[in-house]
Amino acid sequence: MDLNNEQDFTGQAFAEACFILPTYNEQACIQHTIEAIFEQQSRVSGYKFRILVVDDNSSDGTQKIVNGLIEQYECLHMITGEKVGLGDAYKRGFGHALSHFKPDVIFQMDSDGQHDPNLIPDFIEQIQQGYSLVVGSRFVKGGSTPEFSLRRKVISKVGNLLVRYVGGVSHIKDCTSGYRCISAAYIAKCDLGFLSTRGYSFQSSLICELVAQGAKSKEIPIVFTARNAGVSKLSLRDQVEFLLNIPKLGFHSHKDFVKYSIVGSSGVLINLGGYVFLTRHLGIAPEVAPILSIEASLLSNFLFNNFWTFKYRIIKSGFSSRLFQFHLVAGLSGIINYAIFFAAYTSLMMNDIFANLLGIGVAAIANYLINSNWTWKKHLK
Ligand SMILES: Nc1nc2c(ncn2[C@@H]2O[C@H](COP(=O)(O)OP(=O)(O)O)[C@@H](O)[C@H]2O)c(=O)[nH]1
Ligand SMILES: [Mg+2]
């Protein structure tokens, strides 16, 4: 890692770790969190700590407490703004940190004591090992959520499964954790505009974006303990936005989707043209010709996707297994198409053309998502 030019009193160069602490009505917890982070400074050599509090006009006196501490700590800062959501607060925090300081790594951490500051040296150690995205994970061995109700456990697990497999981050078990240490260079590369504004969906879109940018990830176990005081600010609305955001994660790479759609349309032409050629010019029976024309369109779709749409991806699996997977997904898409058509036509009494269109639409989306995340799954170094 490139270290900043700054030097400590021994003349040794050191890097900067900037902690972004979002706060909304955390007057009972914020002082302890700030002090506990600065206390860890002595356990980490080679890094200088800086804290940026992002407070969204808390009404409970949080800002007063932080302003008092700013007098005491030279490397403590605060920016304030309107409350839009946790994601929006983080975006402003990242933007400010990147433009005003020279952080080498950026920590994301809650201000309410649920994230143990004693683990800070462990995060930094992983960065020093060469990882660029270190995630405090509740779902790896040693991690846990002892305070979660069964309902929140289920929501968290199911939500994580969706993000992992739709968002192309299946190797990360905890995609919504708010305790992370990230190489600042990768945050600078991220398209922050794409990221959601609210809580859980922000955390999941950020992790997908970082991985898409090539960040090498590592999870370390954390125990997500009870808050020191106060109440959770993340609401049902955050959970709804999280779910609505899942398809967006899958389509993130819309350039790939556009190319995939062009290839799919060319496949329709090849299928239809092939059928006409086989029946009209070669005299092949109409009962047999579609088998050949469908396979011809599958093969051409596969080749175009392999050598054009996903050409830039480094893929682990071989050419023939990709070809086999592509055929399996096509079969599955056919089943999805039929099942949706059947359900819409018979149970919802939908017009047959609309029912079929709905089936084709859902099957096409499923087909893209599965092929993009399975057949041509990016190999992560
Ligand atoms: N600035 C800002 N901070 C927020 C907002 N929503 C939540 N937070 C902070 O984000 C952290 C995590 O939120 P919390 O309510 O504890 O979520 P939970 O731990 O998932 O229950 C806490 O430090 C909150 O004060 C927001 O809209 N703006
Ligand atoms: Mg919390």
Image (cartoon, rainbow, N blue to C red):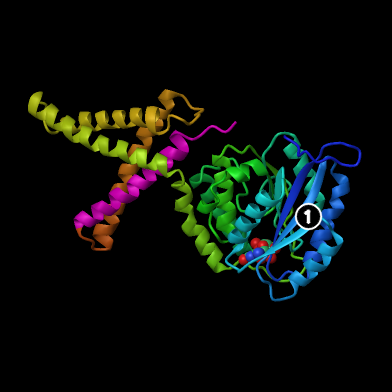
Residue 191 lies within the magenta run:
no
Quarter occupied by the C terminus: top right
Write down the residue under mark 1.
Answer: 116
Q: Main secondary structure of the magenta part?
A: helix
Quarter of the picture holding the N terminus: top right
**Side of 361 relative to 315 (left or right):** left
In the image, farthest residue toward the bottom:
59
- Marks counted in the figure total 1
Q: Residues within 10 Å of mark 1 (few under 14, many from 20)?
A: some
Mark 1 CB lies closer than 8 A to ligand 2: no
Compared across the picture, whether 267 is left or right of 152 comes to left
Q: Position of residue 260 (x, y in %)?
A: 35, 38
Residue displayed at 26% across by 35% down: 266
Q: Residue at x 61, y 53 (%)?
A: 176
Ligand 1 image-quadrant field: bottom right
Q: Is residue 373 above or below residue 27?
A: above
Numbered range of the magenta stretch: 352-381
Identity of the residue drawn at 28% across and 48% down:
360
Viewer-closest of 314 and 183: 183
Q: Looking at the image, can residue 40 be seen? A: yes
Residue 306 in the image, given as x and y percentages of width and height:
39, 29
Front residue of 309 and 361:
309
Percent x, y of residue 273: 17, 32
Q: Secondary structure at mark 1?
A: loop
**Residue visible at 46% across and 37% down in the picture:** 374
Is 355 magenta? The answer is yes
Vertical comparison of 206 with 211: above or below: below
Residue 21 sits above or below residue 131 on the image: below
